[in-house]
Amino acid sequence: MGSHADMTPGKRAVGGGSGRSAYERTMVPKVKRSLFVGINRVLNAVVRRLGLQRFRGADLLYLTTNGRKSGKARSAATVEVGGVRAPVTGAEITGSERETLWRRMNQQVFDYESYQRKGSRRLAVVALTRSSR
C-alpha cells in the first residue's frame, strides 16, 4: 500500500514542511473562531439581560460590525448605548490626537495600556459618527 499521511485530528502529517497537519491548518482556526463567536454572543446576551449599562465608570457600548472574513475595511457598524441603537461609521484616529485620546481613555475609563502590553499589535482608537443608513 502507498504512503498516506495520517489525518487523524491532533496528529501531525509527516513531511508536510510546516509541521502542522492539514487538519490543524484548516479546521482548528475555524473551530476557534466559532467558539469565540459563540462565547461572545452568550456574554452579550447575559450582559443585556442583566441590564448592565455602565462599565468602570463609562457608558457600556455594544459595537456590531460585519465583514471580517471578506478582508474589506469595516467602516460601517451599529452601536447600542443605553438601549438605543444607531448606525455609525468609524474612522481611525492617528497622530497627536490619538495620543491625547489614548491618555484620556486610560485615565478616565480603563487601563488600556496594560491590555496593550499583552498584545503584539497597536490598539486602534476609532471615532464613531452617526450615519443615516
Image (cartoon, rainbow, N blue to C red):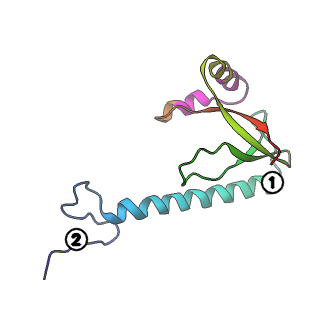
In the rendered image, residue 58, in percent from the top left (x then y), is placed at: 78, 34
Question: Residue drawn at (66%, 25%), measured in percent from left and top?
Answer: 106
Q: Which residues are magenta?
A: 102-116
* On screen, residue 17 above or below 123: below
Secondary structure found at label 2: loop
Tell me the crowding category of disc 1: few under 14, some 14 to 19, or many 20 or more residues within 10 angstroms, Cα based.
Answer: few
* On screen, residue 21 above or below 61: below
Question: Residue drawn at (14%, 79%), measured in percent from left and top?
Answer: 2
* Residue 16 quadrant: bottom left
Identify residue type, mark 1. Leu
| N-terminal label among 2 and 1 | 2
Identify residue for label 1. 50
Q: Nearer the viewer, residue 43 or 78?
A: 78
* On screen, residue 118 above or below 103: below
Residue 5 is labelled as: 2
In the rendered image, residue 40, in percent from the top left (x then y), is placed at: 64, 55
Secondary structure found at label 1: helix
In the rendered image, residue 77, in percent from the top left (x then y), is placed at: 71, 47
